[in-house]
Amino acid sequence: MKLSDLKHAKLKKWVEDFAALTQPDEVVICDGSPAQYDALEDAAVKDGLAIRLNEEKKPHSVLFRSDPSDVARVEKRTFIASKKEEDAGPTNNWIDPTELKKEMTDLYRGCMKGRKMYVIPFSMGPLGSPIAKIGVELTDSAYVVMNMMIMTRVGVKVLDLLGTDGYFVPCYHSVGKPLAPGESDHGVWPCAPIDHKFISQFPETREIWSYGSGYGGNALLGKKCLALRIATVLARDEGWLAEHMLILKVTNPEGRCRYVTGAFPSACGKTNLAMLKSTIPGWSIETVGDDIAWMKFGPDGYLHAINPEAGFFGVAPGTSMKSNPNALIAASKNTIFTNVGLTKDGDVWWEGIGYDAPGELIDWNGNPWTQNKEDKTQKPCAHPNSRFTAPAYQCPCIAKEWEDPAGVPISAILFGGRRPNTIPLVHMSRDWNHGVFLGSIVGSEITAATLDQKVGTVRRDPFAMLPFCGYNMGDYFQHWIDIGKNAPDPKKLPRIFYVNWFRKDKDGHFMWPGYGDNSRVLKWVFQCCDGTAKTVDTPIGIMPALDGFDKPSEVSDETMKTLLSVDVDGWLKEVEDIKTNHYPKFGKHLPKELAAFLDTLEKSLKAEKAGEAEPAKKGGHCGCHCGKKN
Ligand code: OXD
Ligand code: MN
């Protein structure tokens, strides 16, 4: 397919203009065909950028090694360029859009010399779904094209859907490393130095301009840039929700199912939760998505979610047959591995894969590496943020409705983080706005002093959206409140829960087994939605009654009691931290409803401490938001 074949005049002109600026040798339209994918793979292998893996061990799969300076999302080089700084809000890096466009245009000038420019028409979401959106990415990275072909729906069918004048989100991307005549990459991952890297979102014009990084969310622009940062802006204006959430399907022993979404900060085990193997006989969990959910009210009045992605860009280290067999099987063929170890026989290996490294390997830097378990200072073989890019349809537990254009009706929304103390295993909000309050206070404990915060303090990551919200986070809280207010039928809104799998005892051991046993929490969530759960009212919300929770046998009664109790002093400290360090950041953008919840919470905790509170009330909660108890 050639540039002249593009029937969409605006798209064609936009491509021509960017090609004139960046001066590639050739413009290639991505048709989405397997033949084109294979040709890109062959070229990457020939350029020394990719290594073909053993066809028997990992059929049709390759390994890429990136530059050590280009291994992760670069939050400090990620910008929200709205006209007014206030619209980007206190949690984003803001730059003036005019200045930024000038600076980036200079960087883009001639940046694709010696390279091909690929035009990637892609759909986020099942083609033609009323919730899906189309983007077009222009990039000079074959790695990006290959990943986008797994992570999104790419090609002619998207162009057909766009027709002659359909709307698309324009996305520019360059690795920022032009080639001199006759020069090639010679096996060196192309990228630009850190202060030339820009991951820029322009919320008013709904554009994405990325420069200098070829890695993950910096470069696969459908994912964090479009499906979250730009989509949050579209969602605000169009009345829906674009969220950093997994989507899973729970089926009970009677064969009835419910769909649940869940927001957790990065590195809290979202992919594992989305694919967990239930430990309760008769209950099963299937996956609809592992990272992003777009939710819109359907004609039936329920919030319906689609997974805008078509693949998993999962963290490899720690993924094993024990922790997540479904992810390992999804990544057993037709997969791109990035920055993992390579074995002598052409297979991959990483820390936490579940078995020792077989003999001498090549590490993610391309150096020989032999495992030495005695040496606690040994550098890892796989980079801690090494990844697999695997097609979702290969996941054994993918739900049959994962590509349903209508999405799946959501019964429950979970929020969670890594909290060694204070936060109980699970509690349910009293109503939608209380759930918004819980989302707004999500946080994770700092475990390594890599951020500008002390170990042991809580990094607030509201709705797990801290690096992903494309506008003022205070206004985003308000948008969540408005979604509840404008719901066609408030009784059909999802129930909202706060979970914590990471509570530790005084010796630093995890109190809850997690993984498959998280299905026990999902069972209680399911029962809350049915109105059949055994619950108690507490100052922080609705919690499971001890005798109404399906406890794993290895957890003692004492531990279970602690996991399901309210730590009044811990929560009072939590309130204090939110009051002093978190909420004030949002100034006048903080919805008054949220400030009121914080006050009420503080009062009830103080009353509980003073022994003035009514004793915990037992009883089923009807499960909808009508306020009725049964
Ligand atoms: C991701 C992230 O890669 O959240 O999904 O960082
Ligand atoms: Mn994520």
Image (cartoon, rainbow, N blue to C red):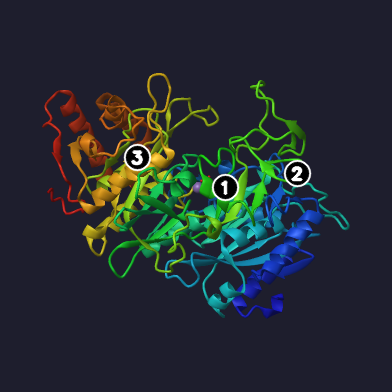
Q: Front-most of 312 and 555?
A: 555
Q: Which mark is residue 345?
A: 2
Q: Which mark is residue 499?
A: 3
* Image quarter in which the N terminus is found: bottom right
Task: Give how far across and how far down residue 295 sits, in percent.
Answer: 38, 60
Q: Which residue is mark 1?
A: 328
Task: Give how far across and how far down residue 522 sits, in percent.
Answer: 33, 46
Mark 2 vs mark 3: give the one in front: 2
How packed mark 2 is, by other alpha carbons closer than 10 Å (few <14, some 14-19, many 20 or more), is few
* Residue at 83% over, 54% down: 184
**Residues under labels 1 and 2: Cα distance?**
18 Å
Quadrant of the image occupied by residue 70: top right
Q: Which mark is residue 213?
A: none
Residue type highlighted by circle 2: Asp
Q: Front-most of 552 and 467?
A: 552
Q: CB at mark 3 closer than 8 A to ligand 2?
A: no
